Image (cartoon, coloured by chain):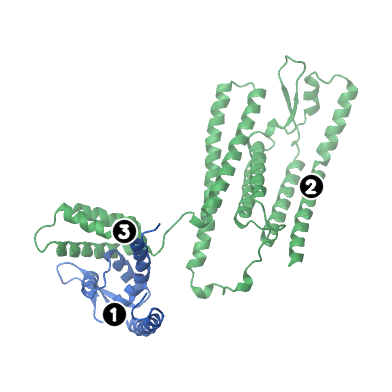
Amino acid sequence: MEMIDRYIYAVIQRLPEGQREDIRKELRGLIEDMLEERLESGQPSAGDVEQVLLQLGSPARMAAKYRGRERYLIGPAYFDSYLSTLKVVIAATLLAMTVVFAIEIVVDKEPVVDQFAQYLVSLFTTAGQAFFWVTAGFALYEYSVHSKEGSPAAAQPEWSPRDLPPVPSQRERIKLSEPVAGIFFTIIFTVVFLFGSELIGVYLRHGEDSPLQLVSFISPGALDRFLPFIAILGALGVLKEIWKIIVRRRTAGLFAYHVIYSLLGLGFAAIMLQTPGFWNPDFLIQVQSTGLVTSGEALETIGTIWDTVTDNLIYFILIITLADIAAEGYKWWNIRKQR
Amino acid sequence: MADVQETIQGILSELRRGTIIIGVLSQLAEAQYGYSLVTVLEEKGIAVDPGTLYPLLRRLEKQELLSSSWDTNEARPRKYYQLTSFGCEVYEGLCREWRALTASMKHIIGDEGG
């Protein structure tokens, strides 16, 4: 008899709270009725109970029938997109972390064991984060699609064949390689800025035997308070590429997202670059101290280049961003014109 | 090569799914509990799996075709289901459609079939 309790519990714990008590009573009545019919009189044996429960089917299937539909975190419709996105994201994260680690080993003076331990820890946390965000993103999408389906018919706009999007032209289609590369570079960029911004710089070696010396462009710790924004920007960038993987065509929504995202990145870069003390203030002194550049004239030239680049980088980024938006806009406009 | 019997059974179970609803509605002019309904339908040659029927009864109740009440007077509490007036109307409509459907099918496959 205890087996019946176990069976009923296994069914109702998969169902909404409000229906459990009712279904529990009903199922118990049903099982007792079925047992009664099996044997005209007397106590049912464990074997009888087993036979009846087998006839009813597994608790998971039984609960699914009560629910009326299968439930998925990520349903079959998007599972393939989910898997390919997850693979790219995890692979890019691991690669980027490994690259940062490899450079740190060469440059830093800390014991390799310590660095390796740090590397392993951040590998797991970052891969975990990546896994979480991709899964959460797809689950949310799945949920929004389902809640639309579940709403009463009146709330749904009437479907019309006229609304069918045209078969995308060659130009309109987004090849899978584009978002995959996009995710890859977004993640590498984000990881480098999150974990190794001090590693961006020039690497100098004075003679064959001396160690490789790093002169950073960005002053240490300058990015610390921007880290959350960098992470968010990275996540939004990956989200954009995931959207591309799902729709696989250039749409107005995607273009709008791209423009907003680019402007957001541009604004963020402007704020960051304007922050006093962003650039390594000791850059020239550190270059000099490597002993590689000795002549005053050469040092002066380097100083001029350094000043020009740091002063004007934001304009360079501005031009690149605008050119990119214009190029995307041109592609999108061309597609619109074809219709 | 797929087994003929197996394929037939697969398609047949799809066909039965809708007819079970009509079968259930036909028997519920008077209140009955789930298992008695299984027995009655079986006697009339319509086999229903209780694991399918019980969730179906709840669904029909949710669609307001059936109403339910618990009878706790007997040895074991039982949930009785009965057609609502809305359910009655739907059932009659379904019967009309069913007759039209069988007539059309008869026309297509003939009396002998095949």
Is label 2 in a helix, a strand or a loop? Answer: helix
Question: What is the CA distance from the residue labelled 1 to the residue labelled 3?
Answer: 29 Å
Instruction: Identify the chain of the residue marked 1, using the numbered disc in the image.
Output: B
Residue A189 placed where, x, y %?
67, 40
Mark 1, Cα crowd under 10 Å, few <14 / some 14-19 / many 20+, is some
Q: Residue furthest top?
A: A209
Q: Nearer the viewer, residue A336 or A273?
A: A336
Q: Nearer the viewer, residue A325 or A273?
A: A325
The disc labelled 3 sits on which kind of residue? Ile
Mark 2, Cα crowd under 10 Å, few <14 / some 14-19 / many 20+, is few
Q: Which residue is mark 3?
A: A12
Q: Which residue is mark 1?
A: B26
Marks 2, 1 in one chain = no
Q: Are marks 2 and 1 in contact (CB under 8 Å)?
A: no
B77 on left or right of A138: left
Q: Which residue is mark 2?
A: A320
Which chain did the renderer colour blue? B
Is label 1 in a helix, a strand or a loop? Answer: helix
Residue A146 placed where, x, y %?
49, 62
